[in-house]
Image: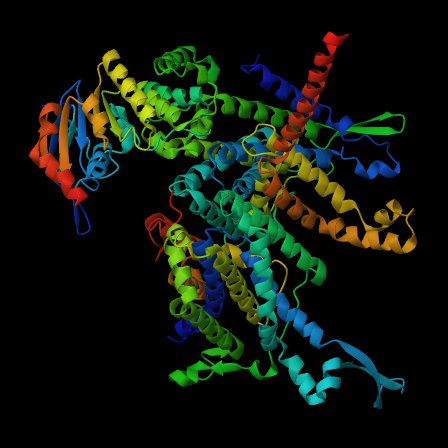
Amino acid sequence: MGILDVKDVNKRFGGLKALSDVNLSVSENTVHAIIGPNGAGKSTLLNCLVGKLIPDTGSVMFDGQSVLGRKPYEINQMGISRVFQTPEIFGDLTVMENMMIPLFAKRDGVFRLHAIESVSSERGLREQAERMLDDVNMLDKRNMHSASMSRGDKRRLEMAMCLVQEPRLLLLDEPTAGMARADTNNTIDLLKEIKTKRDITMCIIEHDMHVVFSLADRITVLAQGTPLVEDVPENIKGHPKVQEAYLGEAA
Amino acid sequence: MDAVILQILNGLDKGSAYALIALGLTLIFGTLGVVNFAHGALFMIGAFCAVTLNRLLSLSHQVVDETQKDFLGNPLKVDVPYVNDIFGEATGSAIIDWSVPLAILFSIPVMILIGVIMERGLIKHFYRRPHADQILVTFGLAIVLQEIIKQIYGANPIPTPAPDAFTGSFDFGVLLGFDPNAVIYPYWRLIYFAFAAVIIGAVFAFLQFTTFGMVVRAGMADRETVGLLGINIDRKFTIMFGLAAAVAGLAGVMYAPINSPNYHMGMDFLVLSFVVVVVGGMGSLPGAVAAGFLLGVLESFASMNEVKAILPGIDQIIIYLVAIIILLTRPRGLMGRKGVMED
Amino acid sequence: MLGLGKKDITLFAVVAVLALFAPFILNPFPAGSSLAQFNAGYPDLMQRFVIFGIFAIGFNILFGLTGYLSFGHAAFLGAGSYSAVWMFKLLSMNVIPAILLSMIVAGLFAVVIGYVSLRRSGIYFSILTLAFAQMSYNLAYSVLTPITNGETGLQVTLDDPRVLGQTATADGGIPVTNLFGLEMRHFTTLELGPWQFQFSVGYYLCAIIMLISFYLAIRIFRSPFGMMLRAVKSNQQRMFYTGLNARPYTLAAFVISGMYAGLAGGLMASMDPLAGAERMQWTASGEVVLMTILGGAGTLIGPVLGAGFIKYFENIFSKINDQILHGWVAWLPDGLEDLVVALIHPFVGKGWHLTLGLMFMLIVIFLPGGLVEGGQRIARSLRRRKSTDDGKSASTEPAE
């Protein structure tokens, strides 16, 4: 039993079978990567985990509880945070304000009407936010308008926003997509640092093998909606089935 | 039964106007992605095209008529329209009598010109602005247009009669085997409906069978891809806007005899037309037409005394009620496509 | 102080001074002088300034913070007015219960309309609110006549019970609205030389309520709730994946802004105890949108500025007629004088709406942030000029 257990999940879009009989178990405190060629169903699978899509059959259990049928915000409240392929942040807000929103959500739950209290009097939460920003080396940018930052900084901010909620499972959807090599390496270092500093489970969907092999403890290869192999990185590297899947894509 | 037929007929002319305005609205929305609150004003300007032509044709000079005497016994001064001088009396008065149908020809170039100026001068700059900005700027434009018309033509409705030949009513009842006068319907409304059907058919044919229409339809389905193909979509959109303006204008010209044009008729129709577009499905042309007629007919049913006796006030709110129910149960409207205006 | 930051205190103080000294500020010209027509310090007009200010402040809490553009807020204004007049008819002419009821009724209205409308966003939300407001308007005109008195409008009459007050005054007239005996229409005139200043009870009541509303709006803007609303506007997706449901927040904002509108409606009826359906018409909804945008949506001071600006110019512009215009340009040669008057004529008097429409378009096109943004741009360019001046003087100093 892992922290996240996916059992016999199927998902169809009209005539297209996007996922068929997906089984996956992510153990606590590991970094689990899901790789596969384009159209393998990685994003569909991820969307099934966070409540954006509901599988046709099968079950998705997080820490012994089913996530199926729950709204994305309820799933987040269970302890799953998600980093998007293109950073989703509150562009109209400053970096510090961006950090305060998840902190309020963590403290107050889904909805609480704090209409008269002042944000500036929330000392405790502000300190927490500052500590987190310091962890991702963004403290000096705390008063910046977040939409005006570079893509790399937006990515950092998004991760900080997810981490400050202290999730038990962090889902990352191609965290280095579209990044330059240097930025990619920075992101890898950041993720490694995060992992050493706290107990957290990560599930990464990634295209870039360099990222996958530098981070993952276990790898699942997905092709045409079905998991081909699941193993430790060393065994995946030369696996014939994996090569076939990727070469198949190239041909 | 005869009452039901009568209500369907009654709903058709209003439904035709809704359908024509909504068609233009959704065409603009579908192609340009702009929410145009000034579209009702175009309908209103169309109606005033009819007024203007009527006045132009009736321009007169005074002539002393020796054969007639006023009550003092002096020769009577009569107004003689210039058209009588040019075409002779019989043809001249016929031309004035037929000023509304003639205004169709007059209004097409005028409306296309107004539409093109509007698009090039204002709307173009709002393609990339948020929908709220588009709503606001076209709302401002609508106010300006209606105030200009008010300054020129005054605040009172201006009766603009249809040709004498169409003043009577058609007795549908006899045709269908009911008593005479049970189902009578004014000729002009019948013509309005037929006219609307022709215009709608023409627009659909234009979009279906011309290359221009094909590009526009492709643009409605996927703007970016069409842009990538290297087709100058901007130019086509300008023409599209002119076309939508002309459709709204024609709807207005022909509506003038049904409802004497006044400066706020555009806004009155706009609110309802928006509801029609939303009910039909944003960006869906058949949806707009179907919803236009549907709501027109529903509205006239709701105003039957039998219905009002059961549900008092229903005639006042039926359209809005239907819109609310449809929006909540079918967010995309009756025939809306996926991905249009969903955020 | 008052739980506000330093900047907000200054802002609040400025608005408070403007509101409390309005009778002076708006009457800068001596009575009887030719410029007296530009005075706006009459109780009637000043009341309208602050009441529409309240309406716009409330609208801004919804539109400015969440970005949801409601085209139906007039429905709440109308509901507030009707409730207040009913209170005057049934209970007493005291304005307090009337104002309270108008807020409660508008709030309940807003819960229902908001609950349904907020299930959609963008243009669909605008259309839904518009549909609800038009429905209310049409019903108020037709079947709801027993409650609204249809086209005539709801008024207080001599037959009303007024269980806690008096049905008629001692001399047989209809009693007037009051605050524990203090009559709303009562005013004193202060004459200072040729100047006249009018201080009315009604205006000061409205002004104080406006200040309270403004204060609360500042608190809401600076609260976690206000920040959540801005987050809704910015990125609902991220909000959803941060464990928050946007809908309760938007609904709360909708209801709060509906109650502001109800309060404005109740105050309108308190100043002049009648209510008509036209207050619910969509043009009235459009007006508050105009005010908010013109002043600057999403800013604190914007809606107040916008409301004052529109109501002031409406009053001034619609008063100008050809005679006055001729008076102004009499110094021009005759032909030119007529031409100038003919050119200005369409924009003044009854043509005020044309000016308003043009102004509104220009603002949306060139100054999407409204008057506040305009002010900021001017301030910035002044500061830049000043800093370059400073730079020059600094560089010249060592030479001395």
- The quadrant in which the N terminus of chain A is found is top left
* Tally of marks: 0
In the foreground, C176 or A80 = A80
Could you tell whether C202 is left or right of C238 in the image? right
- The quadrant in which the C terminus of chain A is found is top left
Residue C163 visible, this orientation: no
Question: Which residue shows up at 23% across the image and 31% down it?
Answer: A206
Q: Position of residue C103 (x, y in %)?
A: 52, 33
Residue B217 visible, this orientation: yes
Q: Position of residue A220 (x, y in %)?
A: 13, 30
Q: Is residue B45 above or below residue C44?
A: below
In the foreground, C183 or B156 = B156
In the foreground, C136 or C239 = C239
Q: Position of residue C24 (x, y in %)?
A: 78, 26
Q: Is residue C250 above or below residue B280?
A: above
- Specify the color scheme: rainbow
Q: Residue furthest bottom?
A: B67
In the foreground, A167 or B205 = B205
Question: Which residue shows up at 69% across the image and 21% down it?
Answer: C17
Question: Which residue shows up at 44% across the image and 30% down it?
Answer: A91
Q: Position of residue B51 (x, y in %)?
A: 65, 70
Question: Which residue shows up at 56% across the image and 65% down it?
Answer: B249
Could you tell whether A225 is left or right of B18 in the image? left
Q: Is residue B106 above or below residue B217?
A: below
* Quadrant of res B104: bottom right
Could you tell whether C160 is left or right of A239 in the image? right
